[in-house]
Image (spheres, grey):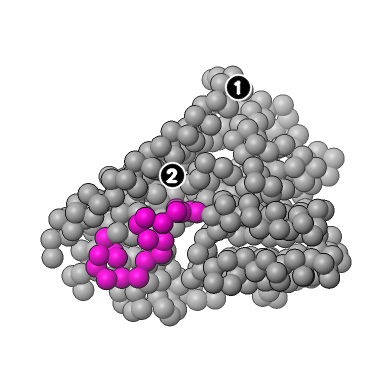
Amino acid sequence: MDVLKLVNEAEEKLEKEFKQLDKLCEINSLKVLDSFHKNEVSEIHFNSTTGYGYGDIGRDTIEDIFKDIFKAEDALVRNQLISGSHALTVTLFALLRPGDTLLSITGKPYDTLDEVIGIKENESSLMSYGIKYDEIDLVDNKFDIEKIQEYLKNNKVKVIEIQRSRGYSTRKSITIDELEEVIKKIREVDKEVIIMIDNCYCEFVSEKEPIEVGADIAVGSLIKNLGGGIAPNGAYIVGRKDLIKLAAERLTLPGEGKEVGPTLGINKSFLQGIYMAPSVVKNSLKTVVLASQVLEDLGYNVEPNATDIRADIVEMITFNDSDKLIKFVQGIQKGSAIDAHVLPVPSDMPGYDDQIIMASGSFTQGSSIELSCDGPIRPPYIAYLQGSLTYEYGKIGLIKAIENLENE
């Protein structure tokens, strides 16, 4: 098989989709640049603090930029938040009290939250503190509006959690329009419930973000979209000012909240990361759109299709064969910049019930805005492909993955 020819032919079919992604990048780039100008970003904001981190104007300016981009009242953007799952945990523990109810309306959340919530028993979970949990599944990839409204009429819910990206499930990810619709339906019944969005993998994939369509608070990771492949760690929480205060006091301590937290030299990386993020997200989207087209041409089941409206940077490829899944993931590793000589194998990972195979030849450990691919070793043996700092590297990685797959 001439894989390069196959990929080039697929690329020619995608001219319209690529132009749309270029336009999206322009819109989001202007959003970022306008905020940089509004906040008068200068070299002084690259400076660092240690110890308590009092008076860190770089940190405060970064949070003002995130606030602007999301059109939120306030933001918490910290290197002390070690991951998206950590930021979600901080937010949930900040918002919920013993006796409160947490309701997920996108089914069971991502695997790493099982022990946070108490779905899988843990003495430090929300449930161990007397917090109740319930969930409502999607029906045919749509919110079950009738069941959600009925539940809210009959139960007092403190927080509704919506996970936009699919995680390791087979459902579709939630678009910004679908999010706006369900929030309107929730508000018809309950105007007080806090609507919290897990926004991981979804930033800059649309022209709008969750706060703009009525969400109260949104959470994401900086080793995904908004770190632009430059931020070495960190996460963000954006939303209502009173809720951000609670999250900040949960992360640090009551009475000090956002006022403390040393940046330890990370401000420049955060600023460069958010500056580059619209372009990097565009490159990631072009990579997965190309992958979708090529793998569909090869006869594999993919979701989304190349022409679908996307909610996140993740492409789901169903192999129905564990060996094919492993071969594809190993091929992505061969096309990576770092550790390309290393052979990924399925292994146990903290927070997951199934063995996971993961290709992540990235400059930042676990970064999924860099070219990466992973999946649980369980039927129907799905690979989740995401990232690529440049489209060209993404295309090369895809070619190597298909060569490895087809040479099986």
Residue range in magenta is 294-313
Residue type of the residue flagged with mark 2: Val
Give coordinates of residue 243: x percent, y percent.
Answer: 77, 46
Tell me the residue at 40%/71% (across/down): 382
Give 27 or 382, whichever is nearer the viewer: 27
Spatial CA span between label 2 and label 1 = 23 Å
The residue indicated by pointer 2 is 281
Question: Is residue 9 toward the left or the right of residue 319 in the image?
Answer: left
In the picture, the disc for residue 103 is none
Which image quarter holds the N terminus? Answer: bottom left
* N-term-proximal mark, 2 vs 1: 1
Quarter-of-image position of residue 244: top right
Give coordinates of residue 225: x percent, y percent.
Answer: 49, 46
Which image quarter holds the C terminus? Answer: bottom left
Decide: is 114 above or below 266.
Answer: below
Tell me the residue at 30%/59% (across/down): 293
Quarter-of-image position of residue 118: bottom right
Question: Is residue 81 toward the left or the right of residue 339 in the image?
Answer: right
Tell me the residue at 64%/42% (across/down): 212
Decide: is 42 above or below 328.
Answer: above
Residue type of the residue flagged with mark 1: Lys
The residue indicated by pointer 1 is 38
Give coordinates of residue 107: x percent, y percent.
Answer: 62, 70
Dot 1 crowding, Cα within 10 Å, few <14, some 14–19, many 20+: few
Decide: is 130 above or below 91.
Answer: below
Count of numbered tags: 2
Q: Tag 2, which secondary structure?
A: helix
